[in-house]
Amino acid sequence: MIAIDTVVIGAGHAGLAVSRLLTQAGREHAVIDRGQLAESWRSERWDSLRLLSPNWMMRLPGWDYQGPDPDGFMTTGRFVRHLERYAESFGAPIITGTTVLDLSRMGCGDYRLATDHGTWRARHVVIATGPGVPRVPTGLGQDMTTATGYRNPAQLPPGGVLVIGASASGVQIADELNRVGREVFLSVGRHTRMPRSYRGKDIFWWLERTGRLARTIDDVRDPAAARREPSMQLAGRAEVLDLVTLQSDGVRLLGHFDGMAGARARFRPDLAETTAAADARMYRLLDAVDRYDDAPRGHRPPAVVAPPPTAVLDLHRAGITTVLVATGYRPDYPWLRLPILGPDGHIRQDRGVTAAPGVYVVGQRFQYRRDSAFIDGARHDAATVVRHLTACNEEPAA
């Protein structure tokens, strides 16, 4: 059994942010990951994906973007290299190809972390494993793929595609498939519509300038609902991509997916209501931006005009050969043997501190700030967690 002060689980941007601050504080630690550094960005993203936030937002502790295109959007390959250089800059102690099998409490306040490559005894554990596994609607069998398994249109069999989910991943994949001539049907659930830019500035510039990204969970009326908020309906490019543009390009919009009966997919008659609610939230945000600096009202993107509802779609008759699910993620901690999970499967925490002394989490959606799950936002939660961890003057584990 290897004794160590701290183990960080996950070598993505959040885990590396924690590692950088632990290194700065002189704390012995290791960062373990089931795959390589930034594994999910290597193996669970489609080929053409670019990050949703501009390059100037690739801020991590002690590391900012220094390239020639601050307003551009990184490909996943460039982002992986960005994180590799970051890890090299401070000699991050990363151990790859190591899967966690069990995290449980030992005596004397330490934790036992069993992996497929040995067992650790640690006084502190920081969980930075990302959003979880794909959430798949009930009623779908095994004959489907998820956004994490999709790579490019050539991977799919010939024919039409039903994409379920109209947040960032769903609209981007629907757009890519439509551009290569596929017949695409898009099932639209609750989503967060945003313009790519407003009054000459990227929408993230406005969200940061107006303090929206720094809004904390203590400021919202319903924290549970805030943490379920869908990702922004954006793409990593300057052009607008939303339901209006998809519809004008020939993508057929459907209501919320409501299950399957054989080859017949059912949809709720809620498309008009769902899109109107998303449009209204977007317009309220733009109004708030205008009030922020008392500027003239900017251009408003047009509202979505919902087509008549479709209750049932026969996939065979419509020529649909692929069902692709892009409905977000659900938490998944099969190895966690500590009583810190809530009824919804998420880790219960307060600013990253759990009820298990010495166990922390970083990178959860709206963990404390609205940008907690963003690449740029993890630095704030990492700093809070490391301050709490290093405030303890206990002797290292032996």
Image (cartoon, helix red, strand yellow):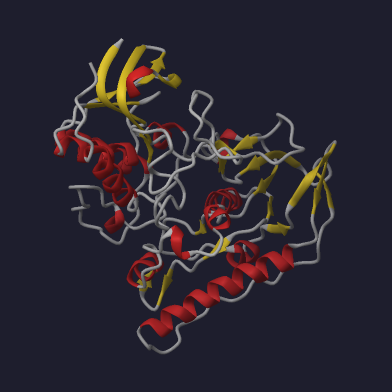
Where the C terminus falls, by quadrant?
top left
In terms of image quadrants, where is residue 191?
Answer: bottom right
Residue 391 x, y percent position in the rendering: 22, 41
Looking at the picture, tell me which residue is in the foreground, 81 or 177: 81
Residue 341 x, y percent position in the rendering: 53, 36
* Vertical comparison of 325 with 175: above or below: above
Residue at 47%, 56% in the rendered image: 235
Q: Is residue 324 left or right of residue 204?
A: right
Residue 75 x, y percent position in the rendering: 36, 46
Where the N terminus falls, by quadrant?
top left
In terms of image quadrants, where is residue 322?
Answer: top right
Tell me, yes or no, if residue 86 can be seen here.
Answer: no
Residue at 27%, 13% in the rendered image: 2
* Vertical comparison of 117 with 32: above or below: above
Q: Is residue 95 left or right of residue 99?
A: left
Tell me, yes or no, if residue 394 can be seen here.
Answer: yes
Residue 10 x, y percent position in the rendering: 37, 31
In terms of image quadrants, where is residue 150?
Answer: top right
All told, the count of numbered labels is: 0
Q: Is residue 107 left or right of residue 224?
A: left
Looking at the picture, tell me which residue is in the foreground, 65 or 364: 364
Q: Is residue 16 left or right of residue 153?
A: left
Residue at 65%, 69% in the rendered image: 277
* Vertical comparison of 226 with 334: above or below: below
- Point out the residue furthest to the front here: 108
